[in-house]
Image (cartoon, rainbow, N blue to C red):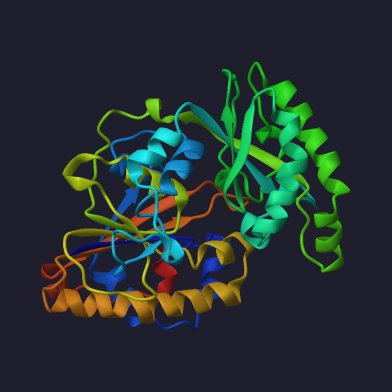
Amino acid sequence: MHLTLFVPGLLLPDEIRADTVFDLTAPTLSLLLGRGQRHELTPDWLPGAFGLAPPLPAAVLRKVGAGEWFGRPADASPKVGAGGMASAGTAANMGAASGNWICLDPVHLQVAREGISLADPAQLKLTAAEAAALIEVVAPLFADWGTLSASSPSCWELQLNKPVDLTTRPLSDAIGQNVDPALPGGRDGRAWRRLIAAAQTLMHAHPVNRDRDGLGQPTINSLWAWGLGGMDSLPDEVQANFNVVWSRDPVLAGLCAAVRTGGGLPCLAPPERFQPASGRVLAVIDSMEHPARTFDALAWREALLAFERDWLTPAMASLKKRECGELRVIGTRIAGIAGPQRTTAFSLTWNDLWRLWRRPRPLTALT
């Protein structure tokens, strides 16, 4: 087993890191920092692991990712999808997701000191019924461009019926940022900005938002266009540097479904904690991402200690017994007001454990 743990939000900005971790003790992570090899990665390392370059056609990948493997527990039967329901199969999903698509995700815009910024969509917790009601009212606005549907309550996609010339910014890169520079541009940008403004008006007075406002929940007051493209923008053979992926990211699930060599690449729901497996495993641990975005130090600390307990410590034990050939942790600093995104990999092998002259390092070295 060669285990890669991808942990968005693991790296905190310099301004708050020392105060956040000063009294934390995580012996396994400290050992990794002291004896492991450190490498700086580019932000597009994950598409690169599939032999691809950004931007990815996220909308169509999400549709494809709703197929045969996505959402199954790591120990589930390959014939059963999430919730015990039989799935349609990767080939069928690729056929249904033909043509060009664009994400049109429900979002909440908030007033900040820097202007109007995009709130973290993880806070919305939109239900399927709410999503269906809002799609019903905004879909006619975009009918000249295509058909609007949802792969999940928080993921809406428009299947385009004609070409569109847009420049957009990925949703994850825009969170917490001033939205004005990130609104759709390109030849059709002005028309799409008008459509989004019209959708804002319709959603503002919608009963769904009145109910959410009454409950103190963030309203759905805009749409975010991004992830334009089709499956034909991907190479015929998407490469796989892993044998299995543990993730709930629908775009990553779509990438896995696009791998057609060697029987394909399964994307499974990550287990709650480390478990032995064979081959090269990529596990996405996203519990620190939202606390890092919102600068919630207490929640981030709790997530880090859980990561140490449930993943790092048992993985290190497996490495010491030579059941795991390599342990690699890839952390990111979320792009935002603290600066651009940063990605760092810390890797450790059994031989590295014997570099006894390299002492464990404090968590302030987590940069």
Residue 218 at x, y percent in the picture: 77, 59
**Residue drawn at x 56%, y 44% as measured from the top left:** 173
Residue 242 at x, y percent in the picture: 23, 52
Q: Is residue 148 visible?
A: yes
Q: Viewed as shown, does residue 289 lie left or right of 274? A: right
Along the viewing direction, whichever of 115 and 161 lies nearer the viewer: 161
Which quarter of the figure has residue 295?
bottom right
Which quarter of the figure has residue 243?
bottom left
Quarter of the N terminus within the rendering = bottom left
Q: Viewed as shown, does residue 313 lie left or right of 182? A: left
Residue 35 at x, y percent in the picture: 23, 69
**Residue drawn at x 65%, y 16% as measured from the top left:** 187
Q: Viewed as shown, does residue 214 lie left or right of 97? A: right
Residue 151 at x, y percent in the picture: 54, 48
**Residue drawn at x 66%, y 29% as measured from the top left:** 184
Which quarter of the figure has residue 346?
bottom left
On screen, residue 76 above or below 243: below
Q: Is residue 356 visible?
A: no
